[in-house]
Each structure stands twice: as C-alpha cells, then as structure tokens.
Image (cartoon, helix red, strand yellow):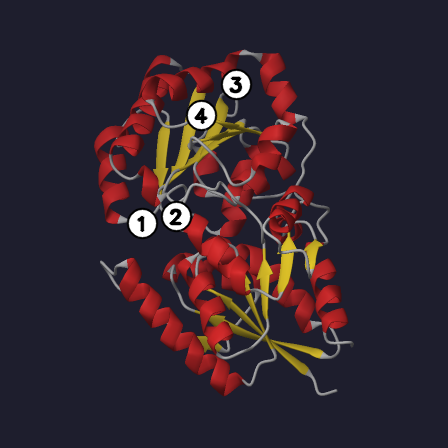
C-alpha cells in the first residue's frame, strides 16, 4: 500500500503541546507521513511550541484576526482546512481535544469523507456551557470521528455510554509525552533571580471564556488578598494576551508585592516553573494533566471539570471562582501539610508518557500496515 499521509491539524498552544510529540513519532514511523496544518488560532504562543519541538508546518493558515467572533473563526477554519485536505491528498485527519480548530477540522474531514482520528477523546462535563464552547466541540467531534483516542479509562467508558464503542482506544494523554522534551534540570529564566526561594511559589493561569468578567475579578481579588497578607508566598502569573484579561489583571494585581505578572511563557518555561512551584491555581484544561505528572496539587478555578479522573484520584480540586472560597482553599494548601501531601502524592491518572507511540500503532493497525 502507498505511504499513508496523516494530516495533523491544530491551532492553539495547548493543542500544539499535545500534538507535537505525536508528530515526532509519526515522522520516524515507516509507512506514515505526517502533514502538519496549523490554523494559528493562537499565533505567537503557537509559534513558541513549534520552535521548541522543531516542527515546520506544511500549511499555515494564519487565520486569527483581532476581535474575531467564534462564527468568523469557524467559517475561516472550515474553508481553509477543506482546501488543505484536497491539496494534501491525505488518508487520515487527526484533530485534538475541544477547540474550534479541532471541531471545524473534523467537520471538513467528514464533508470530504476522510477518516478522522480524535486525540484526547471522551472528556465530558455534560454541561454545554462549561467549558464553553469546548464541551460541545468535543461532543460534535465524537459524532464524526472514526478513531477515538481516549486519554483515560473513564473517558473511554463515557464514549461507550454514548454508543461510541467501535475503535475506542485508551492511550494515555500525549501531554505527558511532551514533558520528556521540556523539563530541564538546569532551567534559567530572568524571574528566577527575583524570586525568594524561601517562599512558596504559586503558579497561576486564568483565561477561559466562561470566567471573563466577574468570576475572574473575584479570583484576582483572592490572589491580591493572599499576597498582601502573607509574606511567605509569591504568585507567578503569565497573563493570556486577551486585552480584557490583561486590563483586569493590571487593575487588580498590577504593582502588588509578590505578584509577578508576566508575558505569556513558552512551553519550556511553563513546564519548568510548574515543576518548581508549590502548587498550581488554574482554569486550564491541559495544566490539570501536566501539573499532577510533576507532583503538584491543582486548584481548579471552575465549578466542574471534564477531567474528573484527577478529582477522583485526588490530584485536582474544583474550587470555583468566588473570592472567599478561593482565598480559603489557597490557605489550606499553604498551611495544612497533610492536605498538601495527600494531593501531591496522589496517583496520576493521565498516562505513562508513551501515548504517542500507542496512537501511532493503532493508526498502523487501522491501515493494516
């Protein structure tokens, strides 16, 4: 059989972090040829990841525009990837997770009657607005995918409960694979010289659409209060470049002692700051998987998560966004050694670091190679 051309589609920084190790395994696998298409849904943050992993896209759609609505972006991604599918002559399209890029990429492949592989399939909250629009993007992809690469047993069981029984494979999460590329024993960053190593560092991210406005304001107020009252703590906060987030962070956290507001970090810096922090405060999906692999407790700034395995294992705790609760939960992990130890030493449910190899073998079997 001819060489199988695998079109790997992604557009955001988290997608790139999780798809990059898979691209590298595809590159070294006889019989398979990866064709990388990026939409640049995140431009600068995406480019940082591509540089770290040494990946040069075959197609760069560069679709993101200031103030673009979800509808505008969806139309651009759908039409752009449809053209790439036609010109590349691909035999399989791989998409990742829950982004607009992933959903529209899968839809374009479906319209072209090309098999679809869904990496990180089966995550659910069953609340269509949390996370928004990601929850429904995942469900829509699940309806058209031909290969479902579930990161955990629970994700696989959720697909089975939706009658997605055929071609569901539990592979682990490729984000664990990426840590093998990024964690450095001798990591350097200008901020390290400013941080007091006797203090407890809290690594923080917050960017999700459903948290814009009042929820984000409440979390920032809890962080500002903690930093003002406790001299044994420092917050490290790389701010998402969305102008609304930058503005609010500057108003509430800017200029405060022991709160370090940074430009977005590349994947190497992000992973290495997490590896050196005391714990993580985030509304990110991917970080809920990355931090436990580094032995770091995660306080999740959401009321619910599509990664319940982490909650059940004890590595994650969903704390919402209300000021008083966020303040209280931060204090618990700072002061209660047993509560901290229980979370830090909990078993990581997200894989063995070989998810990409598992996925590639399944693709080879799918095409009888």
Q: Which residue is mark 4?
A: 319
**Other residues around mark 2 within 10 Å, as few (<14) / some (14–19) / many (≥20):** some
Query: Which of these two is toward me, 3 or 362?
Result: 362
Tag in front: 3 or 2: 3
Q: Which residue is mark 3?
A: 333
- Measuring from the top left, give residue 362's x and y in whole percent: 73, 65
Tag 1 residue: 241
Cβ atoms at labels 1 and 2 below 8 Å apart: yes
Q: Is residue 50 visible?
A: yes
- Quadrant in the picture for residue 271: top right
Does the CB distance between marks 1 and 4 fall below 8 Å?
Answer: no
Q: Which tag is nearer the camera, tag 1 or tag 4?
A: 4
At horizontal 24% and vertical 60% (from top left) the residue drawn is 66
Direction from residue 209 to residue 294 in the image, left or right? right
- Tag shown at residue 69: none
Alpha carbon distance from label 4 to label 2: 24 Å
Residue 56 in the image: above or below residue 311? below
Alpha carbon of mark 1 to alpha carbon of mark 3: how far? 29 Å
Q: Residue 301: horizontal and vertical position, in percent?
A: 42, 31
Left or right of 148, for residue 259: left
- Tell me the mark number nearer the camera, choosing from 4 and 2: 4
What residue sits 73% from the left and 60% below the top?
357
Q: Position of residue 156 (x, y in %)?
A: 66, 48
- The tag earlier along the polypeptide, 1 or 3, is 1
Mark 2 — residue?
A: 264
In the structure shown, which secondary structural element does the residue marked by tag 3 occupy? Answer: helix
């Amino acid at each position: 059989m001819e060489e199988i051309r695998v079109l790997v589609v992604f557009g955001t920084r988290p997608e790139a972090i999780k798809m990059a190790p898979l691209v590298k395994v595809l590159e070294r696998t006889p019989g398979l040829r990866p064709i990388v298409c990026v939409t640049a849904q995140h431009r600068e943050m995406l480019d940082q990841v591509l540089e770290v992993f040494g990946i040069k896209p075959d197609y760069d759609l560069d679709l993101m525009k200031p103030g673009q609505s979800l509808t505008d972006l969806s139309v651009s991604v759908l039409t752009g990837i449809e053209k790439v599918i036609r010109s590349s002559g691909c035999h399989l399209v791989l998409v990742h997770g829950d982004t607009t890029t992933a959903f529209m990429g899968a839809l374009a492949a479906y319209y072209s009657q090309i098999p679809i592989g869904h990496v990180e399939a089966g995550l659910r909250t069953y609340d269509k607005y949390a996370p928004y629009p990601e929850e429904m993007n995942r469900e829509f992809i699940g309806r058209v995918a031909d290969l479902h690469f579930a990161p955990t047993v629970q994700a696989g069981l959720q697909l089975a409960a939706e009658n997605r029984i055929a071609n569901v494979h539990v592979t682990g999460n490729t984000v664990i694979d990426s840590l093998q590329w990024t964690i450095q024993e001798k990591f350097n960053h200008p901020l390290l010289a400013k941080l007091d190593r006797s203090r407890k560092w809290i690594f923080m991210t917050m960017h999700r659409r459903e948290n814009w406005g009042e929820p984000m304001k409440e979390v920032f107020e809890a962080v500002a209060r903690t930093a003002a009252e406790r001299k044994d703590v420092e917050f490290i906060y790389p701010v998402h470049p969305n102008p609304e987030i930058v503005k609010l962070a500057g108003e509430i956290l800017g200029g405060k002692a022991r709160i370090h507001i940074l430009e977005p970090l590349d994947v190497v810096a992000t992973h290495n700051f997490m590896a050196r922090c005391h714990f993580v405060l985030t509304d990110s999906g991917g970080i809920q998987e990355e931090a436990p692999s580094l032995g770091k407790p995660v306080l999740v700034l959401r009321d619910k998560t599509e990664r319940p395995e982490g909650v059940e294992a004890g590595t994650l705790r969903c704390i919402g966004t209300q000021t008083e609760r966020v303040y209280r939960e931060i204090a618990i992990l700072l002061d209660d050694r047993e509560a901290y130890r229980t979370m830090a030493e909990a078993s990581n449910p997200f894989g063995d670091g070989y998810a990409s190899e598992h996925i590639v073998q399944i693709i080879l079997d799918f095409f009888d190679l």
